[in-house]
Image (cartoon, rainbow, N blue to C red):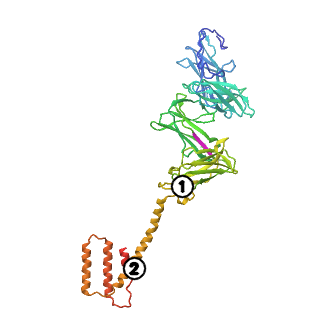
């Protein structure tokens, strides 16, 4: 048998994986055919048969033991491009390409010889070089979420029309399919690849490329990876955002997916979006797995409903979905609705309250959010009244938990996750009811309840009562001073001093301020007895005031 590939064909045995895969281009398949005295060689590429421009690649050709020389042909050229001796010990040869370019892309065959003759050619290996132009997009129709055993369609799309698209399945089993592109009325180019049935025992990871029709092995940069997800019955994770569900333009959006289960990875899915965002999991704590999906600066494209899934590395079967998380983008619509409250911003617990959101612009929906709450905002359809679009949010009856700061937004049904500018904040104050009749709702100032009213009255009366006692005591001191103007007899003074000493000894536990007042009063009496008695003199007021202050 010579290098032209002709030879004896007997006892042919072919082993090809994925026999039910799509027809088309087949890369990196190892096929062994027993034909004649020499084994048909096997040709494969490492690390891959689809390589970026400028990267090295190695082609391996494996034949029968005892081979003297291996040859590698490119395309339809009869003359071999490479000749190599087999590695010792072994039955294969190594062909190295140190820098991949467009000239290295194409179809390759290998064959070998031994003392009895030449083997037939290996099956073709199609070597593709990528990175020549911008990448296309890859999405799943209708969704990358696929029930086990179902089929799905993958759409490769680009604004550049080079004539052909290449789809590759990555990870364990490297397969590829090629289709001619179709042009849409919009000027876009696409190809639709049917895939399935999808089973969870394999990873279904895909990329696609845009390629020249007349140079089918020179292609674009790869699309973003797309993995099909098969939802399972594992415990669902939790999805949350620390900044709340309503985001403003320019903020940084990060979604956290976490679970108590020991998942290896998480996937984030947005409804209507036809690709699946993924991230490897971080495990900061034992038995707690989580990851953060950093989605960048908020724009209108971030609005939507999200779910996340947990999974394991070696399977496409994932957990049950998390509860949905709606991300709303404020500021998309230019109007600013107004927010008011009835009966007023100060109410008692148990009353009925209505928050009214209004806009002069035609709007389909109004939303009400509470500051600091992670709950999804309340949403009501608008009602057109008196040249205003409005919605009434009722709270019946209110409790202290309803207190807080509220804002409202408007939106259109065509873009439910894109909102208007927020209304001015409205603070609702809810006081606890004492169980009696609540104050009339039209009098917000009296809705605080009788308990607080009487406390205020008592606080206001304290300084008035103190002033009254002070004036009364001062008046008493003045009268007392007038009656004690006469000079006491020395014997009477000694008796008075004895009575004062006896009184002090009889009450050792009396307060110190009272004793101080008594001593000052005694000193006052001594001073007044020493003064000359005159019917026209008034007793001095200052010592009396001093005594009164000491008693006080």
- The quadrant where residue 120 appears: top right
- The magenta span reads 325-329
Q: Main secondary structure of the magenta part?
A: strand
| Residue drawn at (58%, 45%) of the image | 377
Q: What's the distance in space between the residues labelled 1 and 2, CA to CA?
A: 49 Å
Quarter holding the C terminus is bottom left
Is 460 one of the magenta-colored residues? no
The residue nearer to you, when weighing 77 against 397, is: 397
Query: Residue at label 1?
Result: 347
- Is there any visible trace of residue 99 in the rendered image? no
Residue that extends furthest to the right in the rendered view of this protein: 185
The residue nearer to you, when weighing 78 against 120, is: 120
Is 327 one of the magenta-colored residues? yes
| Residue drawn at (56%, 38%) of the image | 324
Relative image position of residue 198 (x, y in whole percent) = 59, 25
Relative image position of residue 285 (x, y in whole percent) = 45, 39
Query: Residue at label 2?
Result: 475
Q: Is residue 434 left or right of residue 353?
A: left
14 in relation to 418, above or below? above
Q: Is residue 87 left or right of residue 421?
A: left
Q: Are marks 1 and 2 in contact (CB under 8 Å)?
A: no
Relative image position of residue 490 (x, y in whole percent) = 25, 87
Secondary element at image label 1: strand
362 in relation to 96, above or below? below
């Amino acid at each position: 048998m010579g290098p032209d590939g002709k030879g004896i064909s007997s006892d042919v045995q072919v082993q090809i994986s994925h026999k039910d895969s799509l027809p088309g281009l087949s890369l990196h398949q190892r096929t062994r055919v027993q034909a004649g005295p020499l084994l048909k060689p096997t040709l494969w590429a490492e690390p891959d048969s689809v390589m970026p421009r400028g990267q090295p690649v190695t082609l391996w050709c494996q034949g029968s033991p005892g081979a003297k020389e291996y040859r590698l042909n490119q395309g339809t050229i009869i003359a071999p491009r490479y000749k190599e001796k087999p590695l010792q010990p072994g039955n294969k040869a190594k062909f190295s390409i140190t820098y991949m370019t467009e000239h290295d892309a194409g179809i390759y065959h290998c064959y070998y010889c031994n003392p009895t003759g030449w083997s037939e050619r290996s099956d073709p290996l199609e070597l593709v070089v990528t990175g020549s132009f911008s990448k296309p997009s890859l999405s799943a129709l209708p969704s990358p979420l696929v029930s086990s055993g179902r089929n799905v369609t993958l759409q490769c799309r680009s604004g550049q029309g080079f004539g052909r698209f290449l789809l590759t399945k990555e990870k364990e089993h490297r397969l590829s399919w090629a289709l001619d592109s179709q042009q849409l009325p919009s000027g876009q180019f696409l190809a639709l690849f049917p895939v399935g049935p999808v089973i969870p025992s394999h990873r279904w990871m895909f990329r696609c490329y845009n390629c020249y029709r007349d140079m089918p092995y020179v292609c674009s940069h790869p699309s973003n990876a797309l993995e099909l997800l098969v939802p399972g019955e594992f415990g669902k994770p939790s999805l949350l955002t620390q900044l709340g569900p309503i985001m403003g333009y320019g903020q940084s959006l990060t979604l956290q997916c976490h679970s108590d289960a020991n998942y290896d990875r998480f996937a984030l899915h947005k409804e209507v979006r036809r690709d699946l965002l993924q991230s490897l999991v971080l495990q900061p704590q034992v038995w707690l797995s989580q990851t953060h999906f950093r989605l960048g600066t908020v724009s209108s494209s971030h609005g939507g409903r999200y779910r996340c899934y947990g999974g394991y590395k070696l399977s496409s079967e994932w957990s049950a979905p998390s509860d949905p998380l709606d991300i709303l983008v404020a500021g998309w619509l230019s109007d600013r609705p107004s927010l008011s409250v009835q009966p007023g911003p100060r109410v008692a617990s148990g009353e009925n309250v209505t928050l009214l959101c209004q806009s002069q612009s035609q709007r389909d929906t109004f939303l009400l959010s509470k500051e600091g709450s992670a709950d999804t905002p309340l949403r009501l359809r608008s009602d057109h009244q008196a040249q205003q679009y409005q919605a009434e949010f009722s709270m019946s009856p209110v409790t202290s938990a309803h207190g807080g700061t509220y804002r409202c937004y408007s939106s259109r049904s065509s873009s439910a996750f894109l909102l208007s500018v927020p209304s001015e904040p409205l603070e609702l104050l809810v006081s606890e009811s004492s169980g009696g009749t609540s104050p009339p709702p039209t009098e917000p100032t009296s809705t605080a309840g009788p308990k607080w009213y009487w406390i205020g009255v008592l606080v206001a009366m304290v300084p008035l009562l103190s002033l009254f006692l002070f004036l009364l005591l001062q008046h008493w001191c003045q009268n007392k001073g007038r009656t004690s103007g006469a000079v006491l007899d020395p014997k009477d003074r000694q008796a008075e001093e004895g009575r004062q000493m006896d009184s002090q000894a009889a009450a050792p536990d009396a307060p110190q301020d009272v004793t101080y007042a008594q001593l000052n009063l005694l000193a006052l009496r001594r001073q007044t007895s020493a003064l000359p008695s005159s019917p026209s003199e008034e007793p001095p007021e200052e010592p009396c005031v001093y005594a009164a202050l000491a008693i006080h």
